[in-house]
Image (cartoon, rainbow, N blue to C red):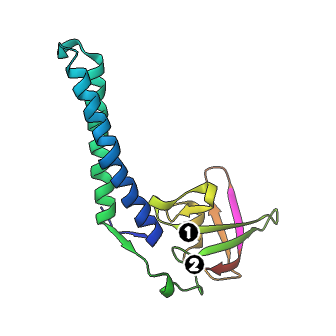
Amino acid sequence: MAVSYVSKEGLQKMQEELHRLETVERPRISAQIAEAREKGDLSENAEYDAAKEAQGLLEGEISMLKEKILNSKVIDMSKIDTETVHILNKVEIKNTKTNAKMSYTIVSENEANLKEFKISTTTPIAKALLGKKVGDIVEVVTPAAKMSFEILSISI
């Protein structure tokens, strides 16, 4: 797995989620397995099968989260440049066709959350913006359409 650049808050959220999975979810599923075992014949016990499957999924999720945390590198916010668009920059853009303005923070895939206007570096818009300057016009090809945006500002 490649290095993933994250904010301090993003790493903290992943660590908190890992803690919750290990200290809350893991014991809950173990209790379900124990309870299902007490019901007798395991060969025809749907509750046992479901709990074991949930345990496998949880362990996979824990393993994946541990790997993400291990491969995360926290970005020093004081060293982020606002001359050009980089990860963790907040970028205000204007659709050149509709004049609609929007503002996004470019983050790692782990931190992306459209409700908070945080878009992943892997999205078409972020890919088009990275490395550009204020005043630049970028063409973005999305599954829906080809759009053009002007970069109005870059901040932290």
* Residue at horizontal 51 percent and vertical 84 percent from the top: 80
Quarter of the image with the C terminus in it: bottom right
| Residue 57 spot, x, y in % from top left | 31, 38
Query: In screen coordinates, is 77 left or right of 56?
Result: right
| Location of residue 116 with respect to 85 vertically, above or below | above
Reading the chain from its start, which is encountered first: label 1 or label 2? 2
Is disc 1 placed on a helix, strand or loop? strand
Callout 1 amino acid: Ile
The residue carrying pointer 2 sits among few (fewer than 14), some (14 to 19) or many (20 or more) residues within 10 Å by Cα, namely many
Snapshot quadrant of residue 140: bottom right
Is disc 2 placed on a helix, strand or loop? loop
Callout 1 touching callout 2 (CB < 8 Å): yes
* Residue at horizontal 33 percent and vertical 63 percent from the top: 69
**Which of the pair 70/33 is nearer the observer?**
33
Which of pointers 1 and 2 indicates the residue nearer the eye? 1
| Location of residue 156 with respect to 72 vertically, above or below | below
Residue 149 colored in magenta in the image? yes
Q: How many marks?
A: 2
The numbered disc on residue 106 is 1
| Residue 26 spot, x, y in % from top left | 29, 41
Residue 25 colored in magenta in the image? no
Quarter of the image with the N terminus in it: bottom left
| Residue 2 spot, x, y in % from top left | 32, 65
* Residue at horizontal 29 percent and vertical 17 percent from the top: 46
Query: In screen coordinates, is 102 left or right of 40?
Result: right
| Location of residue 78 with respect to 27 vertically, above or below | below
The residue carrying pointer 1 sits among few (fewer than 14), some (14 to 19) or many (20 or more) residues within 10 Å by Cα, namely many
| Residue 50 spot, x, y in % from top left | 31, 25
The residue segment tinted magenta is 146-150
The numbered disc on residue 85 is 2
| Location of residue 8 with respect to 58 vertically, above or below | below
Main SS category, magenta section = strand
